[in-house]
């Protein structure tokens, strides 16, 4: 593993534990076992480092979202959407402390938004991927043709985000992410299924 990867791993860990606002590049470099100078050979500033962590160390929702369209007509719609919901819950649960920290620092948020624009990506891509999958299922007759798939995608991912948020805000309790994902999908399919 190269120096850049070690720094990214350390930054992801330190930022998740302490939040962006409470972490310094010196702490990140120390956690990685390098000097701050080594960190700045790979990243121009803390905002640049955070954007790289978000892009390269987030849980694997993006590959699942990209693969959804190919799943149309395979398996069941409920199983396919439950997989999306579980991936979204994992992403939002793991990433929420980092997302919140990013919004607390306007400079970092601006750099992050600029990088997303430059790459042609962003959180809206997950909604678009789920809506495209649902649209493909509509064409196959597995969902009602008049169903609003854009709203359905937003409702599913929004429920997952809210569930993850509440997990961070509520007293520790036993969570059942699989049951939550299945429940969200069941409720959603009541308005979508043919």
Image: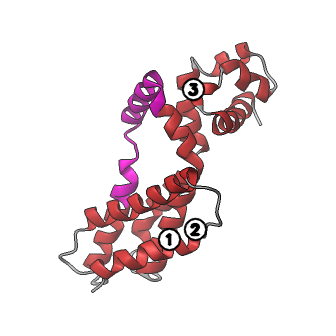
Residue furthest to the right:
33
Distance, label 1 to label 3, CA atoms, is: 32 Å
* Residue 104 left/right relative to 73: right
Q: x%, y% of residue 82?
A: 49, 73
What is the total number of numbered labels drawn onto the structure image? 3
The residue sitting at 55% across, 75% down in the picture is: 179
Question: Furthest residue to the left?
Answer: 146
State the image coordinates of residue 33 (x, y, percent, origin top left). 82, 25
Residue at image mark 2: 177
Q: Residue at x 49, y 76 (%)?
A: 182
Please tell me whether mark 1 or mark 3 is closer to you in this view: 3
Q: Which residue is drawn at 50% across and 38% down?
A: 100
- Give the quarter of the figure containing the N terminus: top right
- Position above or below: 193 against 108: below
Residue linked to disc 3: 21
Between disc 1 and disc 3, whose residue precedes? 3
Give 100 or 75, whichever is nearer the viewer: 100
Q: Residues within 10 Å of mark 2 (few under 14, many from 20)?
A: some
Closest to the observer: 126 or 88?
Answer: 88
Task: For mark 2, give the secondary structure.
Answer: helix
Judged from this view, the residue extending furthest toward the front is 171
- Please give the residue where the numbered disc 1 appears in the rendered image: 181
Query: Residue at the spot x=78%, y=23% of the render?
Result: 30
Quadrant that contains the C terminus: bottom left
Instruction: Sort mark 3 into few (<14), some (14-19) or many (20+) by Cα contacts within 10 Å.
Output: some
For residue 149, side relative to residue 5 (left or right): left
Magenta span dominant secondary structure: helix
The reply to whether the C-beta atoms of the residues labelled 1 and 2 are less than 8 Å apart is yes
Q: Colour scheme used in the picture?
A: secondary structure
Q: Residue furthest bottom?
A: 194
Magenta span of residues: 103-129
x and y percent of residue 161 in the render?
Answer: 45, 55
């Amino acid at each position: 593993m190269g120096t850049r990867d070690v720094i990214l791993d350390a930054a992801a860990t330190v930022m998740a534990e302490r939040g962006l606002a409470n972490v310094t590049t010196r702490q990140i470099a120390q956690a990685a076992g390098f000097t701050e100078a080594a960190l700045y050979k790979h990243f121009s500033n803390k905002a640049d480092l955070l954007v790289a962590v978000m892009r390269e160390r987030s849980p694997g929702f993006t590959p699942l979202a990209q693969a959804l369209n190919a799943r149309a007509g395979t398996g069941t719609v409920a199983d396919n959407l439950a997989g999306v919901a579980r991936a979204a819950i994992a992403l939002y649960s793991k990433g929420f402390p980092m997302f919140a920290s990013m919004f607390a620092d306007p400079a970092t948020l601006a750099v992050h938004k600029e990088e997303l624009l430059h790459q042609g990506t962003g959180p809206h891509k997950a909604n678009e991927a789920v809506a495209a999958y649902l649209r493909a299922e509509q064409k196959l007759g597995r969902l009602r043709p008049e169903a609003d798939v854009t709203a359905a995608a937003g409702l599913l991912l929004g429920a997952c985000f809210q569930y993850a948020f509440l997990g961070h805000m509520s007293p520790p309790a036993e969570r059942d992410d699989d049951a939550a994902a299945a429940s969200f999908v069941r409720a959603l399919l009541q308005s979508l299924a043919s």
